Each structure stands twice: as C-alpha cells, then as structure tokens.
Amino acid sequence: MSAAQTRPALQTINADLMQDLAQRAAAAPRKRVNHNFHADLDDPCHRFLNVLAADTYVTPHRHASPPKSESFVVLQGSLLFCVFDDTGALDAVHRLGPEAPALGIDITPGVWHSLLVEAEPAVVFEVKAGPYDPVSDKDFAPWAPREGAPAADEYQRNLLRRAREKLDHAG
C-alpha cells in the first residue's frame, strides 16, 4: 500500500499539532522538525510544517538546480528571513510572524537565504516543488559554515546581530 493510500484524506493544522511539534523540535538534535502533508518525497508539490526552536542553525542555501521557488508562512513565533548576495553579504532581512510586519514570504529559485528564530517555537508552513532529492535539493553557500561545523554557532550569532542591526537601520 502506498503512502498516498495510508495518509488521511484531511489533515488539520491545530494547536495540539503545533504544540507536539514544538516539543519534538526542542528535544531534537537539530532543534527543528518537519511535519509533511505530502504523501511521499516524489510528490510534485511539497507542503509541510517546519517547526524551529531558538538554537537551530539553517545553513544559508538556495534552490537553483533544479530551480525551485519556495513559500513560507509563519503561523506561530517569529523569524528573521535573511537574503544574501552571491558573496555572502546580507542583502535584506524580513521579520515574519503573526505579530510582525509580514506573515510570510515567497522567493524565486536561486535566492540565497537562511532563517533565524526570534521567538520560539517558530511554526512555518512551507511549500516547495518536489520531488525531493537530498543530493540536489539545496546548494549550500560556500561562504557559510555547514550545520554542525565548529564555526556554525559563531556564524549564527554574528548573523543574528547583523540581521537585527539591518532591521534597526531600516526603520
């Protein structure tokens, strides 16, 4: 029996689900968890909740080959959505969340980006084209440390500082 035949016909996004996922994210080694609504990794459209605790590090990356757009809507908590140029300079920062200036953002393929949790848990509804292939899904930025690297914590702290400064200067 395929995953499409075993998954529920309807799935609700409710407080109980978000609380359960937040607890799992806080306990997870990566400080985040996904809850997929799509049936399997070959689905042409991936829809999922990405739940992030404060200390998670999302390596700056882009979806260029194959090119994939991506949409984010923050349902709970808040994020700083960071956009970079090809050299790693911080181009833009967007605060996203129910109490923020914007709930979400949509990006075209090839945009370097990362997420920083400002208020946890950050519960994000994401949509991205499938299928998922871990080898080609992301191009990781050559100018940023990878998740788990010794320099990742310091890079994340500095990125959070720079992102907040950029927001403060923007107005």
Image (cartoon, rainbow, N blue to C red):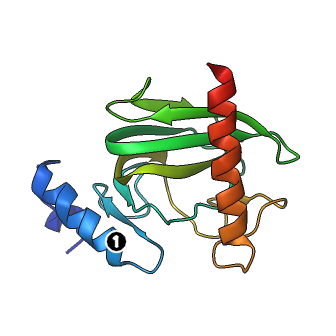
Label 1: how many residues lie within 10 Å, few (<14), some (14-19) or many (20+)?
many
Quarter of the image with the C terminus is top right
Task: Please give left or right for residue 84 compared with residue 32 in the image.
Answer: right
Task: Please give left or right for residue 71 compared with residue 108 in the image.
Answer: left
Q: Amino acid at mark 1?
A: Ala
Task: Please give left or right for residue 20 compared with residue 30 in the image.
Answer: left
Residue drawn at (62%, 30%) of the image: 167
Residue 99 appears in view: yes
**Can you say whether 161 is above or below 109 in the image?**
below
Task: Please give left or right for residue 88 compared with residue 45 in the image.
Answer: right
Quarter of the image with the N terminus is bottom left
Residue drawn at (65%, 70%) of the image: 153
Q: Which residue is mark 1?
A: 26
Can you tell which quarter of the image residue 138 is in?
bottom right
Residue drawn at (77%, 58%) of the image: 141
Could you tell me residue 100's position as x and y percent?
Answer: 40, 29
Kindly give the residue lying farthest to the right in the view shown.
Answer: 87
Residue 112 appears in view: no
**Can you say whether 43 is above or below 128 in the image?**
below
Q: Secondary structure at mark 1?
A: helix
> Of 136 and 57, which appears nearest the observer?
57
Could you tell me residue 15's position as x and y percent?
Answer: 13, 51
> Of 102 and 49, which appears nearest the observer?
102
Q: How many marks?
A: 1
Residue drawn at (64%, 72%) of the image: 147
